[in-house]
Structure formats: structure tokens, C-alpha cells
Amino acid sequence: MAESLQSPVDAVDSNALELVDRASAAAAKGELLVILDFDRTLTSNFMPDGQRVTSAHGILEVASVLSETFKSKAQELFRKYYPIEIDEKMPIDEKVPIMHKWYGQVHELIMKENVTKDNIAGAVSSCKTIRLRDGMLDFLQSCQSHDPVIPV
């Protein structure tokens, strides 16, 4: 008779456990770098009241860090690409390269805006509609308090 699972770890893919072991070893040697996507990975989709959170690009737009020309061009790209992003019938392997193209085009526009770290810090600190997912603040603080610090 099969033994029941005693721990959530019992159900984890052995490749995932190997990855965690390698990451732990790399962190101990100061060789770990955490790369995270911002929108909807670190942040929640909704505020506690149910309002949608502002996207990373949206924070800059709301704070008037980005020009009207940028906003117009970005909106044009949004109208073109967003229907593709939410198309449930399009296979992921077709969708992903198109999404990369969209994000690349938006980032090119942002680079032309000469946005500074101070602009970003000010925009984020003034935004009232952004919320980290549960546990993310602890995760980020853990990375920063690790010896050596794990760059994020």
C-alpha cells in the first residue's frame, strides 16, 4: 500500500529540490543573483478593497515621469498587444515572442525618456495603488540581510 504524503516537500519534483540545493549553495558562496519580474510577480493583482494595482509602467505614468508622447505611443502599443496577451486561444509558444516584442518596444520608449533612479523612487513612494504579494517584503529583506547580500 502506498505511503501517504507526510510533508509538502514529498510532492515536490526532485529537479526543483536540486535547484533549491544548488541555489542555497550558491547563496552561501555569494554567487546567487535573484532576478524577478515586477508586475504581478512581486506585486498583488488587487488592493485589499478590490481595486486593481498600478503596473510598474503605470506608476511612472501616473506620477508624470513619462511624457505625453510616451503615453500616447505606449497606449497605441497597448491597444495592439493587450488583446493578444489576454487571448486564451493563442498557444503560449506563439504568444511569448509577441509579448517580448511588446515589452521591448515599451522599454525602448522608456529609455528615450531619460528616467532617473530618483524619478522612479519618487513615483513609487507617491503611488497609493501598489501592493506587494504576501511574503514578498520578508523575501526581499531576507535577500538583503543574507551574508553575503543576495542582489535582487
Image (cartoon, rainbow, N blue to C red):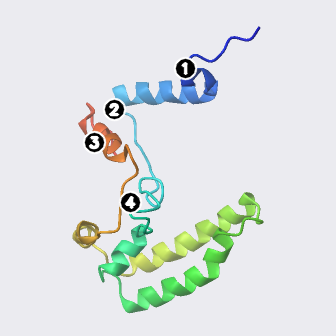
The number of discs equals 4
Q: Which residue is mark 4?
A: 48
Amino acid on which disc 3 is placed: Gln
Q: Which residue is mark 3?
A: 141
Query: Could you say whether the residue bearing mark 1 is in a helix, strand or loop?
Result: loop
Among numbered discs 2 and 4, the one appearing first in the sequence: 2
Question: How many C-alpha atoms fall within 10 Å of the one at disc 2: few (<14), some, or many (≥20)?
Answer: some
Residue 46 visible: yes
Among numbered discs 3 and 2, the one appearing first in the sequence: 2
Between disc 2 and disc 4, the foreground one is 4
Q: CA distance from mark 4 to mark 3?
A: 23 Å
Query: Could you say whether the residue bearing mark 2 is in a helix, strand or loop?
Result: loop
Could you say where residue 27 lies in the image, as x and y percent from the top left? 37, 30
Between disc 1 and disc 3, the foreground one is 1
| Apparent side of residue 96 relative to residue 129 in the rendered image (left or right) | right
Among numbered discs 1 and 2, the one appearing first in the sequence: 1
Could you say where residue 121 lies in the image, as x and y percent from the top left? 24, 66
Quadrant in the rendering for residue 28? top left
| Apparent side of residue 73 relative to residue 86 in the rendered image (left or right) | left
Could you say where residue 29 lies in the image, as x and y percent from the top left? 35, 27
Question: How many C-alpha atoms fall within 10 Å of the one at disc 1: few (<14), some, or many (≥20)?
Answer: few
Between disc 3 and disc 2, the foreground one is 3
Q: CA distance from mark 1 to mark 2?
A: 30 Å
Q: Which residue is mark 1?
A: 7
Task: Please say if the residues under marks 4 and 3 sit with CB atoms less than 8 Å apart.
Answer: no
Residue at the spot 66% in from the left edge and 76% down from the top edge: 83
Q: Quadrant of the N terminus?
A: top right
Residue at the spot 38% in from the left edge and 34% down from the top edge: 31
Task: Please say if the residues under marks 2 and 4 sit with CB atoms less than 8 Å apart.
Answer: no
Task: Please say if the residues under marks 4 and 1 sit with CB atoms less than 8 Å apart.
Answer: no
Q: Of the numbered discs in the image, which one, if any, rests on residue 30?
A: 2
